[in-house]
Amino acid sequence: MKTTIIKTQSDLPLSELLNRLYQVTAEEFDAAKKNCAIQYYGCIEDKAFDIRNVKYSPYSTGPSIQGEIEEIAGGKTMLNINIDIDEHNSYTNTILTLTILVIGVLATLFSLSSEVNKFTMLSIFGVMMIFALLYVIMIKLILKSTRKSELRKFLEITKSKLI
């Protein structure tokens, strides 16, 4: 999948913007979890960052926020942000593919048996397919919602606006 770069602009100068990020970010998850003022953990190097919200542990599937900061004329800054949910989209696609494969194989095996009513069997497997599709759709909607809420929070912290 292609990554979606979100462009934002902040009225804050580069040094102040970086200072705001340093105030709410710790390098280690454990340190971030202990301090209520810290909202993110990860690394900020020069004008690039790769951070994650504290509510997502290092082993969770929560999205990370990667970005670069550019200084532009007038003491303003431009941020290029990517909130990475693509890995999780690929995970849901794998779940859907495997589920369809397993249900298809099971339906084929049961249809070879003459003891089972074929209409009943196909109805049951059809309902199983619908549940698998609904699960994947729900996960994708949750991921998109998570991306929006993380972006909203990050824009608030950096006092930025989408461009």
Image (spheres, rainbow, N blue to C red):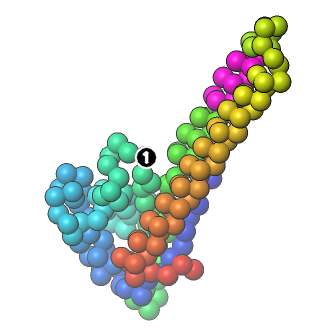
Question: Which residue is nearer to you in this view: 12 or 99?
Answer: 99
103 left or right, relative to 113? left
Compared with 10, 107 (above or below) is above
Question: Which residue is nearer to you in this view: 97 or 123?
Answer: 123
Q: Position of residue 119 (x, y in %)?
A: 83, 24
Residue at 44% across, 92% down: 74
Q: Position of residue 12 (x, y in %)?
A: 37, 85
Q: Position of residue 30 (x, y in %)?
A: 19, 51
Residue at 62% across, 53% down: 2
The mark tally for this picture is 1
The answer to which quarter of the image holds residue 10 is bottom left
Compared with 135, 78 (above or below) is below
Q: Is residue 8 magenta?
A: no
| Residue hosting label 1 | 61
Callout 1: few (<14), some (14-19), or many (20+) C-alpha neighbours within 10 Å?
few
Q: Amino acid at mark 1?
A: Thr
Q: Secondary structure at mark 1?
A: loop
6 left or right, relative to 120? left
Query: What is the magenta range?
Result: 98-108
Q: Quadrant of the C terminus?
A: bottom right
Residue at 23% across, 66% down: 38
